[in-house]
Amino acid sequence: MRNNRALQEFFEGESGRLYGYLIKLCGDEDEAKDLYQESFIKYARNYPEKLSASLLFTVARTVFIDSKRKEKRHDEIPDELSCGESPEERLLENRRQKALSDCLGNLPESEREIIALKTTEGLKYDDISKITGLSTSSIKVKIHRARLKLRDCMAEKDNG
């Protein structure tokens, strides 16, 4: 068995990416924190010998799906405001974030998930394939189609 220090260092190295991924999936910071903790606990219990980011994200994805099944509710990505901006800049950014959130919410869950894995977490197609169980070519196609849908939706919101 690997020592606890190696596992702790692995968790510390992946914590930011995993938390960001979970926020994008569930859209709620409190829920993401709960899922984040549960993901690390399940990973440590079930895979103490492995230090694999793709396996950790797979565990987190499973925890999210299980949670969603229990709660049976829909996701929405929260609006975020950054400090130091003028009120006008915050308003515009808030509107842009809301539009993006709406557009992401219109995507099928599978496309929303792989977009989060690719853009937010910067994972490679092969890693996303391992996490989702889809082929690499299918991942590439889904990401391309999702990006086109997002582009079209954002263009409609800008013009509307």
Image (spheres, rainbow, N blue to C red):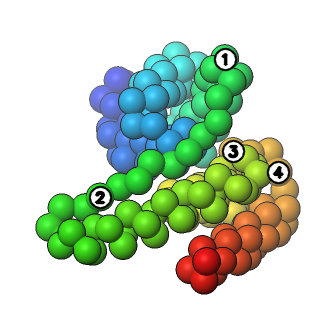
Mark number, residue 102: none
Q: Reading the chain from its start, which is encountered first: label 2 or label 1? A: 1
Q: Residue 81 carries which label?
A: 2
Say which amino acid is labelled 1. Lys
Quadrant (top left/top right/bottom left/bottom right) for the C terminus: bottom right
Q: How busy is the neighbourhood of tag 1: few (under 14 within 10 Å), some, or many (20 plus)?
A: few
Residue 76 figure quarter:
top right
Report the side of 121 relative to 118 (left or right): left
Q: Mark 3 points at which residue?
A: 131
**Disc 1 from disc 3: Cα separation:** 21 Å
Spatial separation of the CA atoms under disc 3 and disc 2: 31 Å
Foreground mark, 1 or 4, reads: 1
The three-letter amino acid code for the residue at tag 3 is Ile
Task: Identify which residue, 93 or 3, lies in the foreground.
Answer: 93
Taking the spot 67% from the left edge, 72% from the top edge, the residue there is 153
Looking at the rendered image, the disc whose residue lies closer to the viewer, 1 or 3, is 1
Question: In the rendered image, is residue 9 in sight?
Answer: yes
The residue tagged 4 is 134
* Amino acid type assigned to the residue bearing label 4 in the image: Leu
The residue to which callout 1 is attached is: 70
The answer, for residue 6, to whether it is visible in the render is: no
From the image, state whether disc 2 or disc 4 is nearer to you.
2
Measure the alpha-carbon separation of dots 2 and 4: 35 Å
Label 1–label 4 contact, CB within 8 A: no
**Of residues 118 and 100, the one drawn nearer to the viewer in this rendering:** 100
Q: Which type of secondary structure does the marked residue at label 3 adopt?
A: helix
Q: Which residue corresponds to the image point at 29% horizontal and 58% vertical from the top-left?
A: 81
Q: Local crowd at mark 3 within 10 Å, few (<14), some, or many (≥20)?
A: many
Q: Of marks 1 and 3, which one's residue comes earlier in the chain?
A: 1
Displayed quadrant of residue 141: bottom right
